[in-house]
Amino acid sequence: MSWGLRGFGIGYRLTEAALELSRDYGIEEVYLLTETADLFFPRFGFRQIPRSEVPHNVQSSVEFTAACPASAMVLDLRTV
């Protein structure tokens, strides 16, 4: 992976836009899985939680069941 654009704020702006869109749609809670960005997302209010705290409908998603390894950290953000 090329890190040539790191430090330009692109990830920050993309995350802000995604969270703004989630608020516009009335989404009250956002979950994400990461193995490498656990230090990036807390600046937006995300906190690490155990997988057992994630609702079952989210735990049954492709991301939780196949796309991300079980070692991925779960982060949670309440948008309201």
Image (tube, helix red, strand yellow):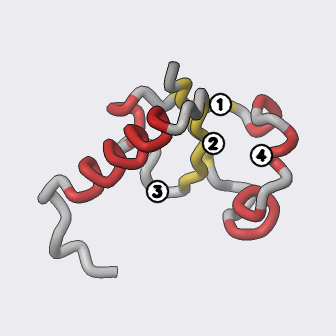
Chain-order first, disc 3 or disc 4: 3
Disc 3 designates what residue?
36
Q: Helix or strand or loop: what does disc 3 sit on?
A: loop
Q: Find out whether the residues at labels 2 and 3 contact each other: C-beta distance under 8 Å.
A: no
Name the residue located 29 percent from the left edge and 55 percent from the top edge: 11
Crowding near pointer 1: few (<14 within 10 Å), some, many (20+)? some
Q: How many marks?
A: 4
Q: Helix or strand or loop: what does disc 2 sit on?
A: strand
Left or right: where does residue 74 sit relative to residue 39? right
Of circles 1 and 4, the one toward us is 4
Q: Helix or strand or loop: what does disc 1 sit on?
A: strand
For the residues labelled 3 and 1, the Cα–Cα distance comes to 16 Å
Name the residue located 84 percent from the left edge and 44 percent from the top edge: 57
Disc 2 designates what residue?
74
- Look at the image and tell me in which quarter the N terminus lies: bottom left
For the residues labelled 3 and 4, the Cα–Cα distance comes to 21 Å
Q: Is residue 43 above or below residue 58?
A: above
Of circles 3 and 4, the one toward us is 4
Left or right: where does residue 18 sit relative to residue 9? right
Label drawn at residue 58: 4
Chain-order first, disc 1 or disc 2: 1
**Residue 24 percent location from the top left of the image:** 45, 36
Disc 1 designates what residue?
49
Q: Is residue 65 above or below residue 58?
A: below
For the residues labelled 4 and 2, the Cα–Cα distance comes to 11 Å
Of circles 4 and 2, the one toward us is 4
**Residue 55 percent location from the top left of the image:** 81, 35
* Residue type highlighted by circle 1: Ile
Among the 4 quarters of the image, the one containing residue 45: top left
Left or right: where does residue 75 sit relative to residue 71? left
Crowding near pointer 2: few (<14 within 10 Å), some, many (20+)? many
